[in-house]
Structure formats: structure tokens, C-alpha cells
Amino acid sequence: MIRFLLNNRLQSEAALDPNTTVLNYLRRDLGRCGTKEGCASGDCGACTVVLAEPHDGRLRYRSVNACLTLVSALHGKQLITVEDLKQNGRLHSVQQAMVDCHGSQCGFCTPGFVMSMFCLQKNSVDYRRESAQQALAGNLCRCTGYRPIMAAAQQACERRAPDGFDLEQHQTLQQLQAIEPARSQEAAGKRCLMPQTLDELAALYRQHPQAKLLAGGTDLALEITQRHQDLPLLIALGQVAELKRTQREGGRLVIGAGATLSDLHPLLAGYHPAFGELLARFASQQIRNQGTLGGNIANASPIGDGAPLLLALDAQLTLRCGEQRRMLPLHQFFLGYRQTALQPGELIESLSLPADAPADLRAWKVSKRLEDDISAVCGAFNLTIEQGVVREARVAFGGMAAIPQRALRCERRLVGQPWRRATVELAAQALAQDFTPLSDFRASSAYRLLVAQNLLRRYFIALTEPQTAIEVTAHEPR
């Protein structure tokens, strides 16, 4: 059974199919149709809701895509939908800002924008355009235009005043803290097991190696919403605190496989600025609030944004099966398209990477949209250059092969050579030997190869001409 707060009302669900998404639960079971279904894949934001949970003695608010969130993720949290914002007959200040700034035309996308803006307001002390852009990047509008919506976000943040959620925060915290951990959820012949410790998780997964591990679910839920499959046995990782821990051990960062991308962003941006810049373009805020770095690696997508940078940093994995652990370099983890070195019943416990930032680490993602889009090519570059000579080279790409992988021939053309344009051109030519990319609806094979070569050239410019502006995002905020 799962228990959570639906706004301020305690909700208990003992017979809810664990394959149910929060979106379908709201619309079909509760008749709350303010939350819209647009894409059912986490791309449009029309289904955005907000989850609040205890964090450091306060409530932490996070926007999520209801279409990708399975109901087990609600346990122990407060679920807030657009219907909950209006209080005592008055619109919430965020809703009023959308009215005042003419931020809605057809209105289909409006509830999602309102909930993302509500979350932005809750997590802000003042208005920052960059923060508003990040908060709203996962919400698409086809008719209004974004200028009035951004104006509404500015008004909502600048005219923020205590609302009913602030006034009831202490009571809400007490209610949430009184909810005991869940053990399982069962209905319709399906089960979701909900372990509370890493040892319990490892034992369960060894006992049930056929189960699907559910972390953020931002990829796994697509099997339900897009492929219309049933997942008879899930093991949810949300209650396993050990998987969310991050710490520095000597010269390395150890990152729990269940840590969300939102939680990791400030950490990685501090140690590795290039990683922070890439994570800022990883899907949308709603996805980053749930998706995990461990999940991004485990699904073995050839276009997963995390893998190229981790390969360039020579990341290591700690894998666990039952009580047994083993270490594996990330470059040995990917075996083929969606195939990994994981054995039955084995899971990723943590990732580790150097804590000290390489001076010349860079990464770039090329996609049709700047934000909330999937890579055509993602390249990461980590060279050690001493006295004008390349001493070490790690160059990795996503989108260029069936797996994310290093460009070994390119690296060999670089190591031991003077760091100059002629060397870079020879290394760029070697990329044609490293990769024979596929053509698909995102990009042709020839385009991908040219982009990869140009990213290497871009890297050369970034290091040798730092005064040259090459980043489209390097502009003064307006």
C-alpha cells in the first residue's frame, strides 16, 4: 500500500496497479483533468505536477512529468496539481500572473506552465531570468509565445507573498513524517517491491533478476506509455537512501547510482564545470528532478548524455550482486546496443570519477533544440597538454555508434604530437575510422561524422583562442 498527501488530504491506495502513471491516476481515477496529456513521453510538460517532500527540516518542491511518474513514487510525498492552487476563491499569484501578462491562449499547455512556475516561485528568493528559463524549458507552447509567459514568471517571483502552502508547511511536514515506509504495492497481478536499504535491494534483485529496477522511471515508463507493455514486477529504489549519497573519497567523487540529476548538478558543476554545463541541457527540469545518473548509464542508450563525459573522465562503476561487489571501468560496461556487462541480479551501486577537474575538459551536445532535446551527437574531450605536446587524450562520443565509446584511433593520432591545427586535422580524419554512424530522423551518417570532426576543431579553438566567443549561451542576461 502507498500513502501520500493529495494536496492536504491523506490518501491511501491499497489496490492500485503499480504500472499506473500519476497522470492516468489523476485523470481516470480521481477525475482531476486539469493535468493534461500531450506527448506521454516527458517532452511537452503539459502534465507537470509538483511533488513536495521533507528535506532539511523544510518542504522541497520539485516539478515532475506526471506521464512518466509511476504511482509508487508518490509514497511519503505531497502531490500538488493545478486544481489545488486556487484557495478561498482566489487565484494563486502564479495563476494571476498568467492572466495579468496574457500568458495563455488556447490554454492546453497552461496548467503545466503554471505548475512549473509555482515550483520556480517556491524555490526562488528573487527573479533570475536564467532560473526561469531552466524551470520552463520543459514546457512547450504552440500558440501563446514565450515572452508573455516569461513576463508572468517574472511577476510571480517578484510579487511573491506567503500562500496557503507556506502557512500549512509545518502541518504538512508532520503529516508526511508520520507516513511509514512502504514495503510493496500489488494489484492487477503486478507487484512493485519497495526495499528500504541497499542490502535489502541487493537481496531482492538477486532473488528476482527478472524484475525491472525503477529509479526515476523517465526511460522505463516509456515501455508502458509508448510501447503499451505490462511490467509485472518492479523494484522501486526511491526509499534506498544509500543510493542517493555522494561523497569525496581521496581524489575521487563517489556518486550513488540513485542520486537525481538535479541533486548532482551543483556538485558536478563545482568539481567539473563542463559537466555542469552539459547537465543544464540534459532533458528538462522535470526529467532532471527524477532521472538518475545511474539510470542514464544502465539503460545503455547510445545517445545518453552522461556517458561521453564519464568516459572522458575514465569513470569506474561499482556493481553489486547480492553481497558481492566488483569494480568495472565504464569503457568495459557497454557491450552492444542496449547491452551491458551487468550479470543477472546485478545492479549499479555507484559511479566514481576524479574529483580534480582537468583543466582542458570540455563537452558539447548538438541537437535540434538548445534545451529539452535528444542529442544527435554529444562529444567530450579531455586532453593533457604539456609544453605544447599532447601527453594524454580521452575523446568520447555519443550518437556515433551503437554504444557510447571512445575514439581510440583519434586519440592515438593526438598523443605524443604537438598541439597544433595540423595534428587536429589528422585526428579529425581518424574519426572516420573510429565510427560509421547510422542515419536516422535526427541526423544523417555524413552529418554526424562532420559534426564530430567539427567538435574536435571547436575544442582546439576553445583551448588556443579562449578570447574567441564560440558559445551561443555566453551572453548577458536580459
Image (spheres, rainbow, N blue to C red):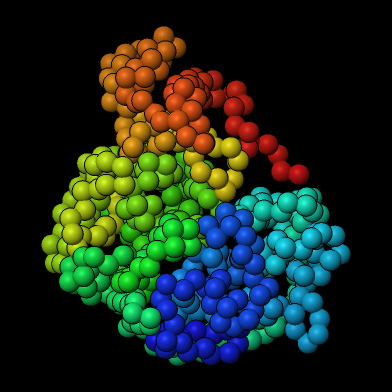
Quadrant of the image for the N terminus? bottom left
Q: Residue furthest left?
A: 324
Front-most of residues 313 and 125: 313
Q: Residue at x 42, y 86 (%)?
A: 15
**Picture coordinates of residue 72 (x, y %)?**
43, 76
Q: Residue furthest top?
A: 422
**Picture coordinates of residue 151 (x, y %)?**
80, 56
Is residue 121 shown above or below 249? below
Front-most of residues 162 and 15: 15
Is residue 370 shown above or below 261? above
Is residue 335 shown above or below 191? above
Q: Quadrant of residue 61?
A: bottom right
Quadrant of the image for the C terminus? top right
**Picture coordinates of residue 217 (x, y %)?**
42, 63
Number of disc labels:
0
Q: Judge from the rendering whether residue 103 lies leftward or rightward of residue 434; answer left or right.
A: right
Q: Quadrant of residue 402?
A: top left
Q: Residue at x 60, y 23 (%)?
A: 468
Q: Residue at x 32, y 83 (%)?
A: 183
Let me know if residue 194 appears in the view.
no
Is residue 457 shown above or below 36? above
Q: Residue at x 57, y 48 (%)?
A: 372
Q: Residue furthest front?
A: 228
Front-most of residues 26 and 263: 26
Front-most of residues 356 and 453: 453
**Picture coordinates of residue 113 (x, y %)?**
69, 62
